[in-house]
Image (spheres, rainbow, N blue to C red):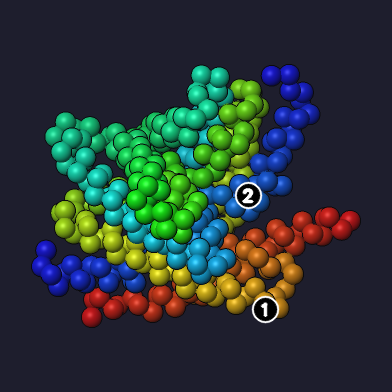
Amino acid sequence: MAESKESLKEVLIAGLWSSNPVFGLLLGTCPTLAVSSSMMDGFGMGVAATFVLIMSNVFISILRKIIPDKMRIPCFIVVIASFVTIVDLCMKAYTPALSKSLGLFIPLIVVNCIILGRAEGYAYKKGILPSLVDGFSMGIGFTLALMAMAFFRESLGNGTLFNVPIFGSKYVPMLGMILPPGAFLTMGGLMALTVFINKKMARK
Amino acid sequence: MTITELILMSVNTMLVSNIVFARFLGICPYLGVSRKVETASGMGMAVVFVMTLSAAISWVIQETILRPMKLEFLQTIIFILVIAALVQFVEFFMKKSMPSLYRALGIYLPLITTNCTILYVALYVVQFKFTFVSMLIYSIATGAGYLLAIVIFASIRERIETADIPEAFKGLPIALVTAALIGMAFMGFAGLVKG
């Protein structure tokens, strides 16, 4: 628990850029592709996943001395699945429209590899506070990645951002960007951009 | 459901609303184990197998236990436990009785637990109240669609390895662009079933 402020800051930054869950670690690609067709969906999904990440990281960190080594994966999954069920039911009750448009992708947060990956790779070994910060920064990193994808897909494919038209009425939407191929294309492009920027920074 | 409807549904789930290109599921293993055609087909086969079994078991649990007792809100937790237990069990069973298949599938078997297609199919057949037969056909067709997608993708990636591509696109970015192009090709199947 004797983590200094500096290293917590590093944990925070790692999730946002250098080991961003989507573009750096290549985890959680399914929801990134699937729910990034509009900014609103991406944001909702990001917030839901962030909540589950923080809660499961904290809980697993608290329980890390009790959970036996050999049984850890099933234990993690039960913890994660409980929080996902909480989120699912809350979203159905309070934000029914969002819950409808995300559909089965909310229960599927259970098998989102970011969450299990952070539980296994981080929370199981570290104290409560760093785990909380890690969950937060990974969650925000995931949300930002989703928003970046959605920014291109919604603006080009629908001519809107958060359902507000931005290009005026004469814009003809590129339907392909909303459809599945557009998602793969956007992600490939963004990933190439990340590689490009990283290389540029390394050269300096 | 009549036989024609079942056939139409299987074509639909395999090609038109393919699990990878139309529903974006199972992308992690799709990108991860598609460097070689051999491993890709191994993964695809394991998915078909586990998907069908887990969908059948989840369906039975839902109809006999969860629905009569009104415990539907426990679906997610129960199903993921069923899948994790099933994967373990299949692994033990294969190791003993089908060692050659076990060796062929290798580490892809345990990885299937976190393949979201499996949980998706289990939740989907329950949510839309499939009958037992249509549930079976649906899960086999979904698995077959996955197998098809991953094998096509792996064979293209084998060729790309040697191609001359821009520095920043090497590796995964070009793989994603490839997936986009295959996805576009698969969109050509749209309208196959309606007509």
Q: Between marks 2 and 1, how big is the CA–CA gap?
A: 25 Å
What residue sits 30% from the left and 48% below the top?
B54
Image quadrant where one finds the N terminus of chain B: bottom left
Residue A176 to residue A111: above or below: below
Q: Which residue is mark 1?
A: B163
- Quick one: label 2, few (<14), some, or many (20+) residues within 10 Å? some
Q: Which mark is residue A25?
A: 2
Residue A147, image x and y in percent? 56, 52
Task: Name the kind of residue labelled 2 in the image.
Answer: Leu
What residue sits 15% from the left and 38% below the top?
B64
Residue A88, image x and y in percent? 37, 38
Residue B32 to residue B10: above or below: above
> Splitting the image into 4 quarters, where does residue A96 fall?
top left
Query: What is the total number of numbered labels drawn onto the structure image?
Result: 2
What residue sits 76% from the left and 25% below the top?
A5
Residue B163, image x and y in percent? 67, 78
Pick the front one: A146 or B34: B34
SS at mark 1 in the image: loop
> Splitting the image into 4 quarters, where does residue A82 fall?
top left
Q: Are marks 2 and 1 in contact (CB under 8 Å)?
A: no
Residue A1 to residue B131: above or below: above
Pick the front one: A68 or A94: A68
The chain ID associated with circle 1 is B
Apparent side of residue B151 relative to residue B62 in the rendered image (left or right): right
Residue A196, image x and y in percent? 75, 62
SS at mark 2 in the image: loop
Q: Which is closer to the viewer, label 2 or label 1? A: 1
Task: Name the kind of residue labelled 1 in the image.
Answer: Ala
